[in-house]
Image: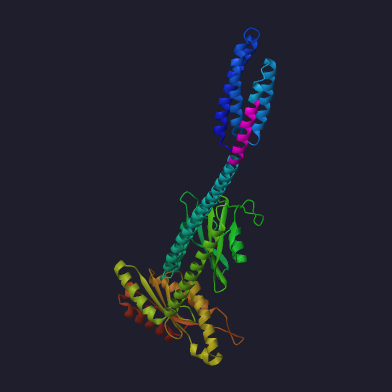
Amino acid sequence: MYPLKHKISIGAFLIAAALLLGVLIFHALSDFPNDERFFYQVAPYLFALCAAVIITAPIILEANGHWLTFFISAVLVSIFSLGTGRHIYIFQTLVLLGLCIVVNTFSKKEIALLSRKSSAIERIEESTNMLESERIRTENLNDALSERLTRYRSLREIGETFSAGLSLQEIGQLAVDTAYNAIPGSDAALLFMVDEKKMRLELMASRKKSDLPKIKSKNGDIFDQWVFKERQPLNVSDINSDFRFDYKPLPGEREFGSLISVPLISQFRIVGLLRLNSKEKNAYSFDDLRLLDFTSDLVSSAVNNARLYDRTRELSVKDSLTGFYIHRYLKERLAEETEQAKVQHQPLSIVVMDIDHFKDYNDRYGHSAGDKVLLEISDIIRDNTKSGYVVARYGGEEFVMILPNTDKERAQALTESIREGISSHPFILRRQETHVTISAGVVSYIEEMKDSEGLLKAADFHLYRAKKEGRNKVCVG
């Protein structure tokens, strides 16, 4: 009820007084047979000490400590009075009784007042603690909301960037950079895209810390295959304790302790996945996975738009049946390649091919059979040409090949290979096996020394020469 420091101070004072009085009483008792006056002189001090103890007992002992002190004092005074034969000290007992009654009345009021004050203080402290806890909780919530707001504001800006006319490769790099920067604690960010022909994952873009080894799992590991198959987000807090996976890294493979991965879904089909790795275990929270999932939505939309753009652009310059370039693009590209060959003094060859008697196939088997012939011949040409060569469908049944950095002899050998492949290929039209041949003309820029239009006319001239000489032949200018 009373402060502890007050109890200690008063208790120390009373103990010191009691010790002093004890010493005096001890001397009084030892000298009593010789000089009883000294003992009488000590009696007032004993009375004063008893009165002081009664007054201070409510502070030190609380409750009814003053009554206990009174009874002890009454016994001591009675013994003292009977021992000395001076009954006047009995009066002191009555004085102490009156003092005890006064102290009892005062202490009850004081204790009640202190109790109310103490209760009020406790309620104030409890309210203060609750307010402090609420303040801390509110600050933490504000910090979390501020962090989320910053994240999503950043994602909005990134979304605007994704919506710009970026290429597929630029989108891939932006995706891994965004994920790596938006979610701290990551050691690597990976973007895998689905090869729709082979139906497998291919690493498209990545970002990692400089001290990590090169990424060897170009087609994804067991975790990537799980996301690819299940089409669901994945959060692995500890790769060594997750019962779903028995992961065994490749020799020299990067080490990681936890990961999060989300699929890229476009038009209800998976087109890839976005993944983050960390060396630390339990590095990612549910909010991190949700943020990565939100990022994947932006990436999926951007990838879909980029592919649609590429497809539209491709359709504008490529033939829808054969997949080769169209006449307009051929003219533009031939002019560029001719100028480059002139400046760099490099060989450039042109090949013009035409299907022999193609009209007869259309008349005999129908136009769908003619389309089938064009498709199969396109595949043979595609199998015999390499990257860097430009192949175009020049007319209904004509094809033109632009062969940069290729001299006349190599162009002739390539064309002969294509001619032989076509003539030996069995074409099944209307359940009947037939054979198709082509004629071709080959010219080289270095020898002809003409512009692009002249080069094309020269190749066309040698094509008709091959036709006149019996078809199924390659004529070189």
Q: Is residue 73 visible?
A: yes
Q: Residue at x 53, y 83 (%)?
A: 373
Residue plotted at (56% across, 44% down)? 117
Image coordinates for residue 195, horizontal then vertical, percent: 54, 68
> Where is 46 relative to 183, above or below?
above
- Residue 377 colored in magenta in the image: no
In the rendered structure, which segment of residues is drawn in magenta? 93-109
Closer to the camera, 468 or 88? 88
Image-quadrant location for residue 398: bottom left
Main SS of residues in magenta = helix
Residue nearest the viewer, comparing 50 with 331: 50
The percent position of residue 75, horizontal first and vertical second, equals 69, 24
Q: Position of residue 32 (x, y in %)?
A: 64, 10
Point out residue 233 in the picture as x, y percentages from the top left corner: 58, 63
Q: Nearer the viewer, residue 430 or 305?
A: 305
Residue 436 in sight from this viewpoint: no
